[in-house]
């Protein structure tokens, strides 16, 4: 499985640590984020990741910024994206189980790295529950 990852300056450290973790687990990882701690704009990195998920270049995505909101708001402008913001492992599991999120978004400034890696693990291992949740996500796109 190929995972795309993006971040702004607030997410650089967690991004590098997560890339190492994911590669160690055998995932292929594509880095769409900045590698610098210089202040930058999250949308410049969110859009390329969203496009890569939409066109199948990567299977799933992970996005990290300070609060997670800049990334989530930008990513969810793309109609092929369901980006879910998570702040603990239960939410990370449910964002897959209930919302079938194809991008996991995390707030680097408000969670520990230990929590972040736990969230990634939960989200990757979770399955979409379907049923009533499938009906709900079908109603999301603006028609
Ligand atoms: C950067 O300072 C911060 O605004 C950004 O990482 C994010 O939290 C925006 O939503």
Image (spheres, rainbow, N blue to C red):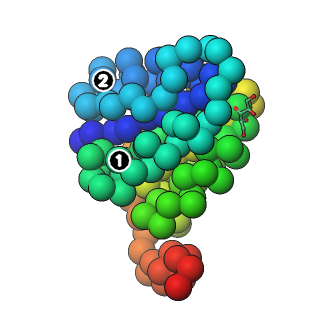
Q: Nearer the viewer, mark 1 or mark 2?
A: 1
Give the number of callouts: 2
Give the residue number, with chain letter if any, for mark 2: 23
Local secondary structure at mark 1: helix
Q: Is residue 112 left or right of residue 59?
A: right
The location of residue 134, given as percent across then percent down, is: 45, 78
Kindly identify which numbered label has been placed on residue 52: 1
* Badge 1 density bin: few <14, some 14–19, many ≥20, Cα 10 Å: some
Local secondary structure at mark 2: helix
Above or below residue 108? Residue 103 is below
The location of residue 26, given as percent across then percent down, is: 24, 28
Which residue is at 60% across, 28% downward? 8
* Badge 2 density bin: few <14, some 14–19, many ≥20, Cα 10 Å: few
Q: Is residue 143 left or right of residue 70?
A: left
Above or below residue 63? Residue 76 is below
Q: Is residue 31 left or right of residue 45?
A: left
Which is more toward the observer, 21 or 15?
15
**Mark 1 and mark 2 residues within 8 Å of each other at the beta carbon:** no
Camera sees residue 104: yes
Instruction: Report if the beta carbon of the residue with label 1 is closer than 8 angstroms to ligand 1.
Output: no
Q: Earlier in the sequence, mark 1 or mark 2?
A: 2
Could you give the CA–CA distance between mark 1 and mark 2, rounded to whole angstroms? 19 Å
Which residue is at 53% across, 42% downward? 46
Which residue is at 42% across, 74% downward? 130
Q: Quadrant of residue 121?
A: top left
The location of residue 85, given as percent across then percent down, is: 63, 49
């Amino acid at each position: 499985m190929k995972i795309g990852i993006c971040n702004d300056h607030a997410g650089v450290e967690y991004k590098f640590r997560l890339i190492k973790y994911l590669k160690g687990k055998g995932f292929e990882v594509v880095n769409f984020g900045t590698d610098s701690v210089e202040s930058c704009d999250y949308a410049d990195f969110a859009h390329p990741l969203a496009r890569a998920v939409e066109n199948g270049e990567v299977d799933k995505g992970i996005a990290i910024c300070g609060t997670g909101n800049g990334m989530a708001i930008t990513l969810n402008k793309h109609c092929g994206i369901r980006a879910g913001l998570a702040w603990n492992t239960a939410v990370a599991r449910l964002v897959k189980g209930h919302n079938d999120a194809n991008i996991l978004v995390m707030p680097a400034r408000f969670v520990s790295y230990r929590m972040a890696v736990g969230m990634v693990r939960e989200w990757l291992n979770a399955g979409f529950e379907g049923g009533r949740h499938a009906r709900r996500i079908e109603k999301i796109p603006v028609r």
